[in-house]
Each structure stands twice: as C-alpha cells, then as structure tokens.
C-alpha cells in the first residue's frame, strides 16, 4: 500500500516547492491581486446578491405590500445585475495585468540567467523543448494567478458571504450549505487533480515534442522534401497531436466528475433547505420569505465553486511547468562561471590560448591541446573536416565554454570568468546560424552597436561587399527584412552578418563557417574578404572547410588526428603555417585543395 498522503498524491511536494519558487519569480503585485480578488468577489457576490434579493422580492411581492416597501429591493436587483458585469470586466483587467506582468518577469529572469550561463547549457536542450519551457511553461505559470489563485480566493470569500446570508435566517440550513460548499470546493477539485495528473504530465511532454517537430518542418522543409522525409515527419507531428487530444480527453473526464459532484452538492443543499426550512416554518422559527431565500440562495452560491475543478487542474499544469522552468534555471545557475576575474587588463589587446583542451559537458576533450596567439592586424584560419572540433574550439576561445584544461586569456584575463558584457567589448563571435531579425537592415546592424547611424550603416555594408545590394533596396537601410532573412540570399545573409560583426567595437572577430551553404565562388570571396576585414585594428579567426581563399590568412591551423591514433582521442593541430607553407609541406592539405579545385571545375561545366 502506498504511504503517500492524499495531498502528496494529487500535488507532490516537489511541485509545490517549485511553484512557490516560481511565484517569487512572478513578483505578484499584491495590491493589484487583492483588487482582482475584490472585484472577482464582487462579480460572483453580485450573482449571489441578485439571487437572494430576487427571491426576497418575489416572495414579498406575493404578499401585496405597499409598493414603497419593495423599492429598495427592486433597485438592489438592478444594482446587482449591472454590478456583476462591471465587476467581472474590471476583475479581468486587473488579474490579467498581474499575470502578464508576472510572465514578463519570469521570462526576463530565464533569459538573463541563460545568458549568464555557459553555452553547453542551452545547446544541451532541444530547441523545441527550450521553446516549450520559455513559452508555454511560462504561460502556465502566469495562468496560475488567473485560473487558480484568483478563483480559489473568490470561492472562499463568496462562500462565507453566502453562508452568512443564509445563517441570518437559519443557522441549521447554513451549516448544511457550508458542508455542501466544502464538498464541492474540496472533494470535486481533488478528484480532478488526482485523475488528471497523468494526462497533464503527458501533455507537457507531447507539447515539447510537437514544438520540436514543428521547428524541424519549418526550418528544414526543403531538405526534408528533397530527401522524401517530409510526409513522414508531418505524420509524426499529426500522431503527436492525436496523443495531445487523447490526453485532453482523459483530463476532461475527472473535470466532468468534479462538475457532477458540484451539481450534486448544490442539489443536496437545496433539498436540505426545503426539508429543514419547512419544519422550521411549521415550528414558527422561520418565516416563509426566509424559507424562499434560504432555498434559492444556494443556486447562486455554487457559482463560486464551479470553476474550482479547472483551478485544481491548472495547479497541476502550473506545478509541472514550475518544475521544468526551475530545473532550467538551476542548471543554468550551476553552470555560471564560479568566480569573476577582476585582474586588470593588459595595455595591449591580445587573445592567447595556452595548452587549451576544449569540449562539452556531454562530450569532453573534443580537441587539444592547442596554443595560439591573436593580435590586432593578424588573421588566423582554422580548418579540418566536419565534426573534428573547429566550432567547439571557437566557442571556447570566445569564453562561452569552460576549457577542459589549459586557459584562454583575453588581454591578460581569463575569458571564461569574464562577464559577457566585458567579453563583448573586446571580442565578438558570429556563429554559423546567427539570427537575422525581422526588422530593418539598420536595426539588424544595431544589434552589435546601438548608436550606429544610417550613414555609418551604409559604410559598413559597403565594407562587407553589399553596396550594390543596398542600392537595390527600396528603402535603403530602412528596408524591412523577412523572418530569419527569408527574403535575401544566403550570400547576402552572410555578408550582412559580417557587417554586423564589423559594426561591433570589439577588437577580435571570431567567425564560424561563414561560407557554409554558399556556392564555392561566393564562399571563397566572402572568406577572403573576412580575413582581410580586420585591417590593422582587428584580429580575425575564421573557421572554415574552404582552403582556396586562405592565402589571405597570416596563419592556418589544420585540425585532425594523427595516423593510427585512437578514434576517441581529441583532435590536435597536425599542421600550422601559412597557406603556401602547408601546400609545400603537408600532402594532405595539398590534396584537399586539389580536390576542392577539381570539383569546382566540374561544377563549372
């Protein structure tokens, strides 16, 4: 037999703790929440008041009293009727203000914490799952205010008011009403929580899976169509949606049971009021008008408990969402740099890697040991076959990954232990999949430096080789771009990212596979321009698999594994020097360049 308490079965301690922590992140405005409860109580209370006063008015009017005796009750009926709508409207505004403000606060905390963590924290989470945690999960945390806390508080207040009204006529009937309200407000919601738990847990997992599948289709539709896998991926998404619908149906059943319990409790209270009230009228302890009020008031009073089943299910959803969000935050916080390097920077900017071994938390020792030195005016190219560890090395040089061993010094300070804002002052990394925002060309450049003028933007675009492209735009630098650069070509996108890098005041530019997915001629021209983009004021490191344009580099590092080495051993620098030196001394390098040029000859036929 299970030793878990009823509360632990329906709402485990871990979820309660996570939800309490997330409520602190929501930073609920207590005054506005109190106003929401007040207005919500006013809306439901107006319904109770309307029912009670109407019952009194109908019963009293049947006795044909003077009209003036009914004037206050008639006016009250109008007041409660109007007040219910007005209070409901104002309550919605106040409660949603609290919830939306709280969601913004949670997302800000999540984004800030993730930004301060290491790269492997974000990269270790599937994009669809990350989207679910920062999207729907945060929404569920906000919903706990509107759909759980508020209905519960309103139900408690309105139930007390209803019991108080009935108690003024008959304490016995009020006691039965209180008991029925307690059953409807506790037993029904508990059944909903207990029965809907597994269904809600499944929905959370399926939603994350559906997000991942949708992102895959949106971003890789062309590749999936060419490979013939698009229909299969779409079928998987449809199957996931069917699972979600099945889970929703499963979670609806206990909610329906809770509604049935609420209706049954209301019927019991009305029947008990008739039985007890009739006896009290016969005994002379209750007047006929009081009997009618005590009988009809419960019909309105149970409006307060009708939404508690859904509120209980929302607690389950919010509790699960809180677990996922807090787990993400705890992982990110634990991965933040343990201490800050406050040592003074050197007078001369310089990036130095000493015996650096780079890797990920899930895949350590990818490459290394590697030593290199980058100064303003120097251009370094890093080459090697796909998966050898070039990007991992670049992320480590940028201070985004903690070295497995060795160190990276940025102007004499530990790059990994510097705050991201301090690193961005001296170094900028442009990844292969860097984002182009759905805004103007100018605003996309201002991502790197907010004070760029239109004239400066034009100069940067010209420096990146986009002068002719800019001249063709209808509104120049104020032209809107589509989502993720869908309205421009791959080469234009890469050069726009180059212009953004050049806009940064950073001394060192680190670029990951800038020629990826471009035709050979465009890729070679772009890489050549990048290696020359730094001039005398900047240092440049370019990771690429293209060898043809590397004559523009001051030094080329070739990553690989020695012949006969253990396949699991980290990649190392198997050759380094200028492009010409490697052609003369490294047969593998010369062969790779020959193959590159041979294939281009076939492409040109």
Image: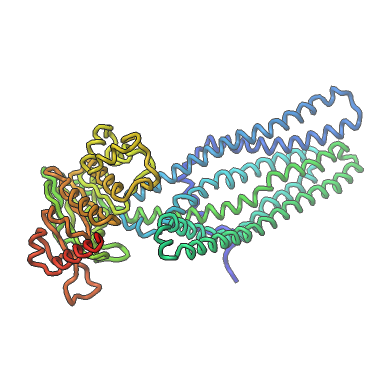
Position of residue 21 measured from the top left corner of the image (x, y, whole percent): 46, 50
100 on left or right of 369? right
307 on left or right of 286? left
Residue furthest to the bottom: 564
236 on left or right of 111? right
Residue furthest to the top: 68
Position of residue 175 measured from the top left corner of the image (x, y, whole percent): 76, 47
Position of residue 122 measured from the top left corner of the image (x, y, whole percent): 36, 55
Relative height, residue 542 to residue 64 (above, below): below
Residue shown at the point (33%, 49%) measured from the top left: 489
In the picture, the quarter occupied by the N terminus is bottom right
In the picture, the quarter occupied by the C terminus is bottom left
Position of residue 303 measured from the top left corner of the image (x, y, whole percent): 71, 44
Residue shown at the point (8%, 67%) measured from the top left: 585
Is residue 140 among what the camera can see? yes
Relative depth, front residue between 138 and 9: 138
267 on left or right of 5? right
Relative height, residue 4 to residue 172 (above, below): below
Residue furthest to the front: 605
Relative height, residue 549 to residue 37 (above, below): below
Relative depth, front residue between 105 and 373: 373
Residue shown at the point (74%, 50%) measured from the top left: 180
Total labels: the figure holds 0
Is residue 368 among what the camera can see? no
Q: In the figure, residue 425 lies in which quadrant?
A: top left
């Amino acid at each position: 037999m299970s030793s878990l308490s009823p509360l632990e079965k329906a709402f485990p301690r871990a979820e309660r703790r996570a939800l309490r922590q997330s409520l602190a992140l929501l930073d609920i405005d207590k005054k506005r929440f109190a106003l929401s409860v007040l207005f919500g109580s006013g809306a439901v209370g107006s319904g109770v008041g309307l029912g009670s006063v109407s019952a009194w008015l109908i019963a009293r009017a049947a006795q044909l009293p003077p009209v003036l005796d009914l004037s206050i009750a008639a006016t009250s009926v109008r007041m409660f009727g109007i007040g219910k709508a007005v209070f409901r409207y104002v309550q919605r505004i106040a409660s949603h203000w609290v919830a939306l403000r709280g969601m913004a606060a949670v997302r800000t905390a999540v984004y800030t914490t993730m930004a301060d963590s290491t790269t492997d924290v974000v990269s270790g989470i599937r994009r669809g799952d990350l989207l679910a945690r920062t999207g729907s999960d945060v929404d569920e945390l906000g919903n706990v205010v509107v759909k759980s806390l508020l209905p519960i508080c309103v139900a408690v207040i309105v139930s007390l008011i209803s019991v108080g009204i009935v108690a003024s006529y008959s304490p016995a009937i009020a006691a039965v009403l209180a008991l029925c309200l307690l059953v409807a407000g506790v037993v029904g919601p508990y059944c909903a929580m207990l029965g809907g738990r597994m269904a809600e847990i499944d929905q959370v997992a399926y939603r994350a899976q559906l997000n991942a599948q949708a992102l895959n289709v949106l971003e890789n539709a062309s590749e999936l169509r060419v490979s013939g896998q698009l229909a299969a991926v779409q079928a998987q998404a449809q199957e996931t949606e069917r699972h979600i619908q099945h889970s929703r149906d499963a979670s609806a059943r206990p909610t329906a049971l809770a509604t049935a319990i609420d209706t049954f409790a209301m019927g019991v209270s009305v029947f008990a009021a008739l039985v007890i009230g009739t006896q009290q009228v016969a005994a002379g302890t209750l007047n006929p008008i009081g009997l009618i009020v005590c009988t009809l008031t419960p019909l309105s009073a149970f409006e307060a408990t009708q939404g508690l089943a859904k509120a209980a299910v929302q607690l389950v959803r919010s509790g699960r969402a809180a677990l996922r969000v807090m787990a993400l935050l705890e992982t990110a916080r634990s991965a933040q740099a343990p201490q800050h390097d406050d040592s003074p920077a050197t007078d001369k900017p310089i990036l130095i890697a000493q015996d650096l071994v780079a890797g990920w938390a899930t895949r350590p020792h990818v490459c290394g040991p590697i030593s290199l030195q980058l100064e303003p005016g120097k251009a370094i190219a890093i080459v090697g076959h796909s998966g050898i560890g070039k990007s991992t090395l670049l992320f480590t040089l940028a201070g985004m990954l903690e070295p497995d061993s060795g160190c990276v010094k940025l102007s004499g300070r530990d790059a990994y232990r510097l705050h991201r804002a301090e690193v961005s002052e001296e170094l900028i990394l442009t990844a292969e999949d860097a984002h182009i925002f759905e805004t103007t060309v100018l605003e996309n450049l201002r991502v790197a430096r907010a004070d760029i003028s239109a004239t400066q933007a034009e100069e940067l675009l010209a420096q990146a080789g986009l002068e002719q492209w800019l001249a063709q735009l209808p509104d120049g630098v104020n032209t809107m771009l589509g989502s993720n650069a869908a309205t421009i070509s791959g080469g234009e996108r890469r050069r726009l990212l180059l212009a953004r890098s050049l806009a940064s005041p950073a001394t060192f530019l680190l670029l990951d596979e800038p020629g990826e997915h471009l035709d050979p001629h465009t890729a070679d021209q772009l890489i050549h321009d990048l290696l020359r983009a730094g001039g005398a004021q900047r240092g440049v490191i370019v990771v690429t698999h293209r060898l043809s344009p590397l004559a523009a580099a001051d030094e080329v590092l070739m990553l690989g594994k020695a012949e006969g080495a253990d396949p699991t051993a980290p990649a190392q620098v198997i050759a380094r020097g200028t492009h010409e030196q490697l052609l003369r001394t490294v047969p593998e390098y010369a062969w790779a360049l020959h193959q590159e040029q041979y294939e281009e000859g076939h492409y040109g036929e």
